[in-house]
Image: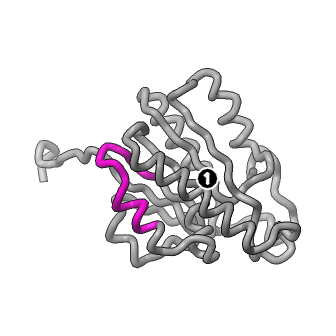
Amino acid sequence: MAFEDYRTKESVVVVYTGEGKGKTSASVGLMARSLGNNWRVAFIQFIKHWQVSEHVFIEDIQALYQEKLFFYKGGKGFFNAGDLSAKDVTPEEHKLAAEMTFETAMDCATNGNYDLVICDEINNAVNDGLLKVSDLKKLIERRSPKTSLCLTGRNFKTELLELVDIATEMKKIKHHFDDKYLANKGIDF
């Protein structure tokens, strides 16, 4: 097929999933690329409520990008993750936070004000039962035709693959956490 036979899409759905590191990092890179293209971007965070490095970065660049960058941090921490769980948060509080964050994501994806909406860790929220698969399907299907969507987190539901345009699985080959080393600030979070 010749290059001139290829077409462009008005918007796409991108998924970064898998057990390996780099899903959020890839979405932050996508955010940078989009802002560099003068797009309006919404970055919606589903799980991480503590101050991780990407939150500091986004908050710092908001002054530069102003109304072109919307950031919403709605998570309550890891749910049902053993020692890493947010133990002081009830399952009901996790679910409510996920639902409220989803409402924000749905508004940003459907209102036509954003060229890109990133829903970081939304796949985890669905996999953990904090949101329904039907919620994620609704987000994909009801987004504004001009709004691209980026969905990150482990365990993206394969039954929704037919609705996305780009899906990348991050595969862990080796990670020092397996050798009982904690995550490194600036690298892992």
Residues 60 and 176: in front is: 60
Query: Which region of the structure is painted magenta?
Result: 136-149
Asked if 69 appears above or below 93 in the picture, the reply is above
Tell me where residue 138 sits by quadrant.
Answer: bottom left
Question: Judging from the image, what secondary structure is the residue with disc 1 in?
Answer: helix
Q: Where does residue 170 sit, x and y in percent of width and height?
A: 56, 64
Residues 31 and 62: in front is: 62
What residue is shown at x 74% (from left), y 48% (from top)? Answer: 187
What residue is shown at x 17% (from left), y 48% (from top)? Answer: 6
What residue is shown at x 88% (from left), y 67% (from top)? Answer: 88
What residue is shown at x 62% (from left), y 70% (from top)? Answer: 19
Quadrant where the image shows the N terminus: bottom left
Asked if 167 appears above or below 130 in the picture, the reply is above
Residues 105 and 128: in front is: 105
Q: Where does residue 129 sit, x and y in percent of width and height?
A: 61, 77
Q: Which residue is mark 1?
A: 24
Q: Where does residue 131 sit, x and y in percent of width and height?
A: 57, 71
Asked if 72 appears above or below 152 in the picture, the reply is above
Tell me where residue 8 sits by quadrant.
Answer: top left
Q: Residues within 10 Å of mark 1 (few under 14, many from 20)?
A: many
Asked if 115 appears above or below 24 in the picture, the reply is above
Residue 127 forms part of the magenta stretch: no
